[in-house]
Amino acid sequence: MSIATGAVGDAIDAKVLRRAMGAYATGVTVVTVGGAALHAMTANSFTSVSLDPPLVLVCIDHKAVMHRALSGADHFGVSVLTAGQQEVARHFADNSRTLGAVQFENVACRPGRYTGAPLIDGALATFECELWDAHDAGDHTIFLGRVLSLQTQDREDGLLYFRGGFRRIERAS
């Protein structure tokens, strides 16, 4: 067992911070942009911000291809993945995959009705969003989206990311 600490005034090591943040289980999503900048990216930094108006956020690294795509877009989509969609998550996390429309060829998805952003078939939930605002935050940008539409499934088999790997949601007794 290793223990690493950081305190005010100490430099926080990025690897230690990443490991500590890995102790917080998150859902796994695929963020998408349609149109000329067609792109997708696996992300776990997605959350609800406001119910009125309905706002969500995604955080994207400045160096990511998705950052350029989303910065130039008016809309985006988010698909919350099921435990059975690990391969979809791995595919869109693979930085060596071919980009553009071809990255969607072997993934079941459909264009969103309001945004045209690809939405993953069978996802636990899908969101179509209008880009509301963006804020720089260190090496990432926080993109806020106003939810235009959403769909959910009544399932309990969500995909989680915890301590560097995928996990399944299991009902607590």
Image: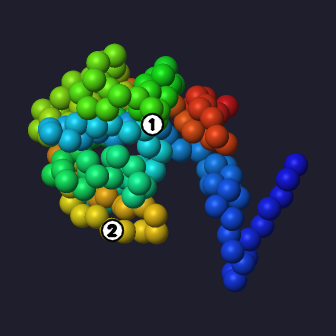
Residue 170 x/y as whole percent? 60, 29
> Could you tell me which residue is drawn at 39 percent across and 58 percent down?
62
Distance CA(mark 2)–CA(mark 1) = 24 Å
Q: Secondary structure at mark 1?
A: loop
| Lower sequence index among marks 2 and 1 | 1
> Could you tell me which residue is drawn at 42 percent across and 68 percent down?
137
> Could you tell me which residue is drawn at 26 percent across and 48 percent down?
69
Indicate whether 114 appears above or below 136.
above
Q: Nearer the viewer, mark 2 or mark 1?
A: 1
Q: As drawn, which residue projects farthest toward the right?
A: 1
**Image quarter (top left, top right, bottom left or bottom right) of the C terminus:** top right
Q: As drawn, which residue projects farthest toward the left?
A: 114
Residue 85 x/y as whole percent? 46, 23
Report the amino acid beneath label 2. His
Report the amino acid beneath label 1. Asn
Count of numbered badges drawn on the protein: 2
Asked whether the viewer can see residue 166, the reply is yes
> Circle 2 sits on which residue?
135
Whether pointer 2 and pointer 1 mark residues with C-beta atoms closer than 8 Å, the reply is no
Residue 45 x/y as whole percent? 45, 50
> Circle 1 sits on which residue?
95
Q: Secondary structure at mark 2?
A: strand
Q: As drawn, which residue projects farthest toward the bottom?
A: 9
Mark 2 Cα shell of 10 Å, populated few (<14), some (14-19), many (≥20): few
Q: Is residue 10 left or right of residue 170?
A: right
